[in-house]
Amino acid sequence: MIDNEQMISKIYKIIEDSKEKVNKDYYRLNYHIMPPVGFLNDPNGFIQINGEYHLFYQFNPFYPEDKKVCWAHLKSTDLITWEWLPIALLPIEWYESHGCYSGSAVNNNGIFTLIYTGNVKNSMGVRETYQCLAESKDGINFKKYIDNPVIYNQPEGYTRHFRDPKVWKHNNLWYTVIGAQTEKKQGTTLLYSSIDLVKWTKIGELDSLMKDFGYMWECPNLFTIDHKDVLLFCPQGVKLKGDLYNNIYQCGYFIGKIDYETGKFTHEEFLEIDRGFEFYAPQVTVDDSGRTLMVGWIGLPDEENSETKENNWMHCLSIIRELYIKDNKLCQRPIKEMELLRKKLIQYNDLKINSDNFELPNNGDSYEMICDFVFEDDVVFGLKLRSKDGTDGINLYYDSKNEKIAFDRENIVSAKRETRKCYIRNNRKLKLHIFMDKSSIEVFVNDGQETFTARIYPDKKSNGIFIFCKNGNVAVNIKFWNII
Ligand code: FRU
């Protein structure tokens, strides 16, 4: 069996050997977290501790030849500039031989503690699942708990799809939610409590009103915001329904109230957290200033097509977003710190658009842009981004009559156009706040009432920004900043 040192030196050799190839890839991002080589998926262990933010992610440096998922580790003081630290968890021990899967981080009386799932495929090819701890005194080196695992496989009535512990403290007790599947192949979440993170007592299944909502729920987060409890999770196996649930797997939330004694969770309907093509496995933390922060993976499990694969790397994380509740919905705004990235402001006031394609004089592939539209009639208007001549690129438009906003792009495999849509009430105005970064786009609609997140692979010369309006007039104020 390979030990820590051997695995580390193998990983650093892969990073070194691929450096040139990876770095010359046009689609490398300017201000998003991405792997130095190999495969990135879920963000993990997001926490502010001793004044510093730490963020980990699922990292398989051996992709595509082999799958050995580690926890990459980064830290930051401003959530913008991230320092790469030694890999925190390597899949070395018997209880994690097939990967240190997703989990979270807590401050346990000054001890920085990670709680994660050890994934094992045993010699019969059968999955085993172990919840484990790792601790650090210096915030850099993590030692696996000597009596790991702390939860040994799944409880009765559930399958081995049992993973992704998210831990938090409530009234002096630790709690965790864990993604699960019942023996009847229904997705759910289990709630546990503990006084010491070591001995865990099952409270029960979060009593969902939706018993039949997919076959597995991954990556649950449970948090309180604005006196409301939110369960944010990723159900798999939910069937498409009109504009809803169009991606291979979903990511969304229930707002409600949890009874910590019984685990009963009373809640409202499921809402998707993002309306774009790729947003998954978000991790939520509350920082020292009381902000509820979220970061997600701009990718989806089982979708491994990317222009970057041939250059030995794949995927990135989203920008960090702040969550807040408005009209009983979870809304998102880019964190204030994003402003640190802004270059010179370019501004257009009261541009009147009544034609097919108005091209802005500026352009780019890495920028922030805020467009405030006002309109009177039943109009269809919007933006074409990363466009060469106004006929191609990303199409982001609002249909005021049908009260729908749409986002469309070219499918990476079929090259056909594909669309995601959602309802936005016609208020005679619309705000689009866009973060473009080479091969990613994040759109905050009306201060994050809805968001659209996706990876895109435009030609590097496709940098134009066009505004269009069909059958009517719109006026728009624009603020634009290049980033980097
Ligand atoms: C979600 C997920 C988690 C798992 C991890 C493995 O993307 O499947 O459920 O812990 O990825 O990398």
Image (spheres, grey):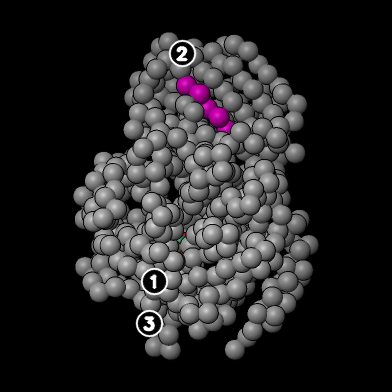
The amino acid sitting under disc 3 is Val
> Of 85 and 342, which appears nearest the observer?
85
* Above or below 446: residue 66: below
Residue 341 falls left or right of residue 268: right
Snapshot quadrant of residue 218:
bottom left
Find out whether the residues at labels 2 and 1 contact each other: C-beta distance under 8 Å. no
Residue 455 falls left or right of residue 261: right
Residue 165 falls left or right of residue 333: left
Circle 3 packing at 10 Å, graded few (<14), some (14-19), many (20+), is few
For mark 3, give the secondary structure: loop
> Of 288 and 102, which appears nearest the observer?
288
For mark 2, give the secondary structure: strand
The amino acid sitting under disc 1 is Lys
Which residue is disc 2 drawn over? Answer: 375
Q: Residue at x 75, y 57 (%)?
A: 23
Q: Is mark 1 within 8 Å of ligand 1?
A: no
Which residue is disc 3 drawn over? Answer: 126
Depth-wise, is mark 2 or mark 3 nearer the camera?
A: 3
Q: Residue at x 49, y 28 (%)?
A: 447
* Above or below 140: residue 412: above
Depth-wise, is mark 3 or mark 1 nearer the camera?
A: 1
The amino acid sitting under disc 2 is Phe
What is the distance, in whole Å, between disc 3 and disc 1 at their CAs? 26 Å
Q: Which residues are magenta?
A: 430-434
In the drawing, what numbered circle is on residue 199?
1
* Residue 329 image position (x, y, % from top left): 36, 34
Mark found first going from the N terminus, 3 or 1: 3
